[in-house]
Every structure is written in structure tokens, then in C-alpha cells.
Image (cartoon, rainbow, N blue to C red):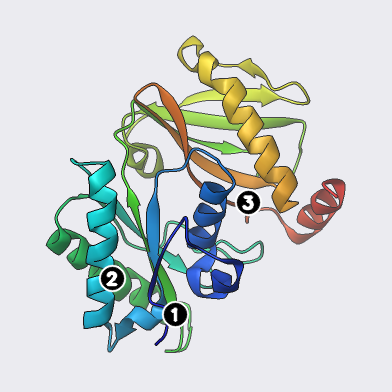
């Protein structure tokens, strides 16, 4: 029987092609000890005729039960992880449906179907992708952040690696993505990671710099990190290649990291 669901902690390298960029990266970060909220990945084989199979539903329920034993009042985020997403050459980040704050099994299963069916299908057709286009879905414990932000380990426009540039908002990061709130900006200066920005975030800045520099070194290319501060602790929510860099800059920057 095909594997349909796997937790971040149980993930193995041979599943990388089934998990998509987001799922693979989150699982790897968890296993390497980065502070990432726990979760699991639902593979394309879990779906038949755009619906979850009964076997997959049972696996999902089992995963949720285990996670709730550790986090009784858990809420979850459900996001797509397309098999071609978050690669260095092509990223569709932000184009897919994301459902936040779901709690019960039924809400989570509905959210999984929403993510799978609506935005991805529409976007695939708009981009001229064929019907074999596949994706996985990530279900992850959702933190309640005091601060949410992003960090670029290189300037996404110029490709400069002199500094890491970030910004953040208070509360959920969706305010940052949507432009609902004006972000606070900061800079982490290489090679020491010294901080220049609002005083309230300074106490978290050194850890963020260490995590970002470590992930960038392991990936061998500039990264776009999503992060949050929840319960006075810094957590990482995603790391993906900066795909806005034009090819010449990306190639030259990649050679600098090896």
C-alpha cells in the first residue's frame, strides 16, 4: 500500500519527491533540531478523484490524536506543498490556499480538501499545467504569535549578501502578506549578525541570525525564512529559496556559498 501520510519526525529522504518543497524542508528542519512546530505531510496518493481516501482519513486522524496528547488545545494550519513549489527556479508560494486556526478533525479534513481542490487547481489551469500536476498538503501545529516576520538572507532584488533584511508585524503573519499592517524593518549585519532595528526584537535577533546562517549554509543558496515569536520563544515556520533573484545573480551567489 502506498504511503499517504507521514509525520515530520518520521520523514525519510526517499519521500522528498512526494512531499513538495514546503513539506520536505519543514521535516528536515524538525529532524535537525530547529525550533519548528510539529506536523505531518499528506502525500498525493492520499487523494483519489480529488477526495481523501478512507485509509488516508484514518491516518490523518491518528496523527492528530497523537499531536493533541502533547498539545491539548491545539489549533492547526493547513497549507499546500506542491511538488514543484519552493524550488530554486520556480515557486508558487502565496498562490495556494492556506487555512489557519482549524481545530476539530472535521475542520481539518475540510481544510485539506479546500487546499487541494480550489486554489491549486485554478492556478494550475491558469499556468497551463497539465492535469497530472500534483501536490502534498502540510498540517502543522499553529502557534499564536506575538510577532510574525520574514527574513531574507540576501537582497531579493540586487542579490547582495552584505546584510540579511527582515520585517515583522505584531500578531499573525497574514497581516504582513496582505499589507494590512505596516511592518517594522530590521537588518542583521554580516558576519557577526549585529542587529539594527526596533528594540523590542533585539533579544531574538541573534538566534534568528544563527538559524538563518546555518540553514543557508546547508542549503547552499539564499533563503526566505518565515518566523514567529510565540510564548516569548522564536520559532521557524518555513525556509525556501529566494526565487525572485534573476538567474545570473542566483548562480553567482550559489557559487559563493560552496
Instruction: Classify 80 as above or below 153.
Output: below
Labels 2, 1: front one = 2
Q: Compare residues 166 and 191 and report the one nearer the observer.
A: 191
Could you say which quadrant of the image residue 155 lies in?
top right
Q: Which residue is mark 2?
A: 59
Q: Position of residue 216 (x, y in %)?
A: 70, 44
Give the CA separation, mark 2 to mark 1.
Answer: 20 Å
- For disc 1, the neighbor class at 10 Å (few under 14, some 14 to 19, many from 20) is many
At mark 1, the secondary structure is loop
| Count of marks overlaid on the render | 3
Q: Which residue is mark 1?
A: 134
Q: Position of residue 214 (x, y in %)?
A: 69, 39
Which label was assigned to residue 57? none
- For disc 3, the neighbor class at 10 Å (few under 14, some 14 to 19, many from 20) is many
Instruction: Classify 198 as above or below 151.
Output: above
Instruction: Classify 168 as above or below 134.
Output: above
Q: Which residue is mark 3?
A: 242
Sequence-wise first label, 1 or 3? 1
Give the residue displayed 37% in from the left and 72% down from the top: 120
Sequence-wise first label, 3 or 2? 2
Q: Position of residue 8 (x, y in %)?
A: 45, 57
Give the CA separation, mark 3 to mark 2.
Answer: 34 Å
Give the CA separation, mark 1 to mark 3.
Answer: 22 Å
At mark 3, the secondary structure is loop
Mark 1 and mark 3 residues within 8 Å of each other at the beta carbon = no
Is residue 139 left or right of 244 when viewed as pictured?
left
Is residue 177 left or right of 88 when viewed as pictured?
left
Residue 199 shows in this picture: yes
Give the residue displayed 28% in from the left and 43% down from the top: 70
At mark 2, the secondary structure is helix
Amino acid at each position: 500500500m502506498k504511503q499517504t501520510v507521514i509525520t515530520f519526525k518520521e520523514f525519510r529522504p526517499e519521500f522528498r519527491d512526494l512531499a513538495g518543497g514546503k513539506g520536505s524542508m519543514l521535516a528536515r528542519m524538525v529532524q535537525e533540531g530547529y525550533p519548528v512546530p510539529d506536523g505531518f505531510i499528506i502525500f498525493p496518493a492520499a487523494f483519489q478523484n480529488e477526495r481523501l481516501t478512507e485509509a488516508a482519513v484514518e491516518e490523518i486522524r491518528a496523527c492528530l490524536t497523537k499531536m493533541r496528547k502533547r498539545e491539548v488545545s491545539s489549533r492547526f494550519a493547513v497549507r499546500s506543498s506542491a511538488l514543484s513549489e519552493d524550488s530554486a527556479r520556480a515557486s508558487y508560494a502565496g498562490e495556494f490556499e492556506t487555512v489557519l486556526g482549524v481545530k476539530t478533525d472535521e475542520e481539518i479534513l475540510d481544510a485539506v480538501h479546500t487546499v487541494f481542490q480550489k486554489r491549486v487547481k485554478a492556478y494550475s489551469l491558469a499556468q497551463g499545467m497539465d492535469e497530472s500536476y500534483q501536490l502534498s498538503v502540510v498540517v502543522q501545529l499553529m502557534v499564536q504569535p506575538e510577532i510574525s516576520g520574514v527574513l531574507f538572507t540576501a537582497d531579493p532584488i540586487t542579490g547582495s549578501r552584505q546584510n540579511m533584511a527582515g520585517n515583522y508585524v505584531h500578531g499573525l503573519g497574514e497581516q504582513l502578506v496582505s499589507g494590512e499592517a505596516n511592518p517594522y524593518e530590521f537588518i542583521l549585519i554580516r558576519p557577526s549578525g549585529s542587529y539594527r532595528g526596533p528594540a523590542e526584537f533585539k533579544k531574538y535577533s541573534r538566534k534568528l541570525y544563527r538559524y538563518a546562517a546555518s540553514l543557508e549554509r546547508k542549503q547552499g543558496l539564499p533563503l526566505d525564512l518565515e518566523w514567529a515569536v510565540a510564548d516569548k520563544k522564536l520559532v521557524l515556520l518555513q525556509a525556501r529559496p529566494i526565487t525572485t533573484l534573476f538567474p545570473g545573480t542566483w548562480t553567482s551567489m550559489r557559487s559563493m556559498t560552496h
